[in-house]
Structure formats: C-alpha cells, structure tokens
Amino acid sequence: MTKRTSLLLTQRQALWFGFKVVVIFSVLICVVTLWKLHSQSEFRSPRTARRSRSVVDQFVGPPKIAFMFLVRRDLPLDFLWGSFFEDVDASNYSIYIHSQPGFVFDQSSTKSSVFYGRQLSISIEVGWGESSMIEAESLLLDAALEDPANQRFILLSDSCVPLYNFSYIYKYLMASNRSFVDSFLDQKDKRYNPKMSPYIPKYKWRKGSQWFTLVRRHAKAVVDDVAILPVFKRFCKRRPPLDDSMGKQNIKLQKQHNCIPDEHYVQTLLAMRGLENELERRTLTYTLWNESGTKMEKKSWHPITFSYAAANPQRIKKIKAIDHVFYETESRTEWCRTSSTSVPCFLFARKFSQGAGMRLLSEGVIGQYGRRTVVDTR
C-alpha cells in the first residue's frame, strides 16, 4: 500500500512538473509573440500615425515645397543652398534632412541657419545600393507628410545644386499636377529577380534615377506601401564589389544576382499602383555619367563630379538648354513640358564639389545672397 501511494505521488509530481513546463513554455511563446508585435508596431508607427492624420489634409496658406535632403553626414553645399533660400518666404517651403543617426544641424555643423534643427528625429544607417536607401527616402516622405501644406516633395542629395532661383522652381512645380519620376522599361535589364514574381511581375519592373519630385498623393503611396518594399528588401540586393583579397572566390561572388533598389523602387511601386499615367516620366535632376569605352567599364558607370573648372557658365547654360530626354530602351523621346508649355528639363544638377558650388555662387548662377535671379528663367 505504501509503495502504491508512493508511486501515485511520483506520477502526480511528474504530471504537475510537466504541466508547469507547458505553462512556462506557453507563457514564453506569448511573451516573444507580443514582443515581436510590439517591435513591428514600433517600426510601422510613423506610417500608422500618418494614416490617421491623412483625413486632415486641409491647410491654410500657400502650398509648400518640401526639400528633402538625403545626405551622408553634413551638407557640403550649405552655403549655396543658404543663398538660395535667403529672402524667400518661409511659408512656401519646408526642409527635411536625413543624415546619419545622432548628427545634428546647428551652429557647429552648418554655415546656414536655415538648416538648424532640420534633421529627422528618426534616421537609419544608409548603405549605397542597399534597401536602407529607399527606407531613408520613405522616412523623409513620412516626416514631410506631417505638414498638410507640403504639396510637392523633392528628393535631393548632398551634392545637388539648384539651377534656377526659388521663384522659378516654385512656379514650375506648382504649374503641374504631375510627379516627375524618371521611369522606363529596359528589356535587357538583368536586375529583375524572377523570385519577385508573382508579387512584382516582370512587365511592371521599371528603372530610373532615384531623384524624384512627387505630388502629395504619390508621396502617400510610397509611405503607405507595405507590400512592395519587403519584396525589394528580400530579392533586390547589390552584388558584393570585387575584392582582390578574395582571389578566385570573386568569380563566384560575381555570379550572384545584382540589383540596386533605389534605381527601381519608386518607379516600380507607382507602376504597380497603376499611377504611371499621372507622371512626367523624367527626373528634374541632371546627372552627367562617365562615358566608358569598354563593356567592363560600362558595368560600373558612376556620375561625374563637377569641379570648379567644369562648373563654368557655358556648361551650366547647356544643361539649362536641354528640352528633351531620349530613352533608348523604349525608343521614347520625353519632351519637357508643364501644362502643355515647353520648359527646361532640369531644375537641379549633381554631383557638384564645394569648389564648383562656390563658382556657381560667385558667378551669379544663384544670386549673391539670394537677391539676383538666375540667368534666363524663360
């Protein structure tokens, strides 16, 4: 009898121990699940908050242009942009800067007070050719959408310069209700990853410059996206660069699929959303690419940086005289117009060194202290 009682107690203890293990394990699963949901909600909270504000898009006063600077750290051409914004009514524009986390624009980091405190409160580390680039763009748009008066959204780099004064650029953009997005179809493009299908079909895959100008409804489409961005993050990745120390392993690395997210994301997203007919399919930012002679060199084209000597009045005049863009892969000529009126194709240009920026300022391409107008605003 004593043995049977002892056996029953042992069995009960085992069952009770097993029950406690199951309960503890279940609690741990719940805690981990709640933590993941909380983490996801924190990541998406800016977008969720913005959606709740989208019904309050009414504003009083003039529509604004949101100048969104995507920079590595500081703004090397702040002196030029400071001159550009000087004497401009602050109710006509807003400034947003995505810099490296923790960097603050103040008296110690910029020559122009117009940039004080304009850095985003939330920023991320950005790598060239990585999905972090398009995530930073989305953060800029999300912050700019906070102000319902912002109706045009311009993405600019730290090496961009304006080719015209503020007044001309403002009238140019407000005269059109369309976004300016460089977007084209390249049948020979090898960056499309078949694994993206069916989420992104190949016929919707687009390519183009990342430097866009969006109207508000298209900016919202980018920020609200929760379907296309994850596909890009998973299947559109830059191939590792050649590394001499890797030896023969470079051959294997170079066989990996290569994709540059920022040259495809916005274009493809807007095509997927059926919004291409609302676009001027061209960028407003001029870039001069190196004209390499060999096939190997062409695979690594990069934009040319304008030096002091290259930023001469004759070169700037030629850029401003461009009135059409030819897309070879589509045999398409994009004539530059706003509201059926012929206009210059480009309002901005890149990449400009500090010396080049000083020359533009001293020679009046951007009026000294913002008081002189740009040459030939047509």
Image (tube, helix red, strand yellow):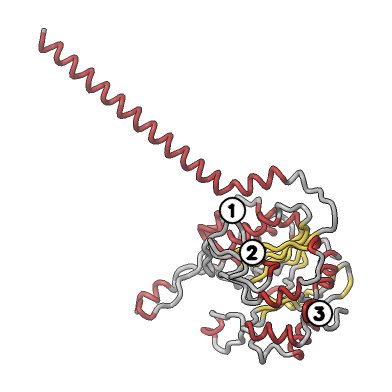
Q: Which residue is mark 3?
A: 323
Q: Which residue is mark 1?
A: 199
- Label 3: how many Cα within 10 Å (few below 14, some 14–19, many 20+): some
Residue 360: in sight, yes or no? yes
Mark 2, mark 3: which one is toward the viewer?
2
The answer to whether 61 is drawn above or below residue 158 in the figure is: above
Residue type at the position of mark 2 = Ile
Q: Quadrant of residue 301?
A: bottom right
Q: CA distance from mark 2 to mark 3?
A: 30 Å
Residues under numbered marks 2 and 3 in contact, where contact means CB atoms less than 8 Å apart? no
- Label 1: how many Cα within 10 Å (few below 14, some 14–19, many 20+): few
Q: Which residue is mark 2?
A: 97
- Secondary structure beneath dot 3 equals loop
Q: Quadrant of residue 309?
A: bottom right
Position of the C terminus, as image quadrant, is: bottom right
First along the sequence among labels 3 and 1: 1
The answer to whether 223 is drawn above or below residue 257 in the figure is: above
Q: Is residue 266 left or right of residue 284?
A: left
Q: CA distance from mark 2 to mark 1?
A: 32 Å
Of residue 26 and residue 183, the one placed in the foreground of this image is 26
- Secondary structure beneath dot 1 equals loop
Question: How far across and how far down the image is residue 55, in percent?
Answer: 76, 44
Q: How many marks?
A: 3
Q: Residue at x 75, y 85 (%)?
A: 316
First along the sequence among labels 2 and 1: 2
Q: Residue at x 58, y 59 (%)?
A: 135
Give the farthest residue toward the front: 107
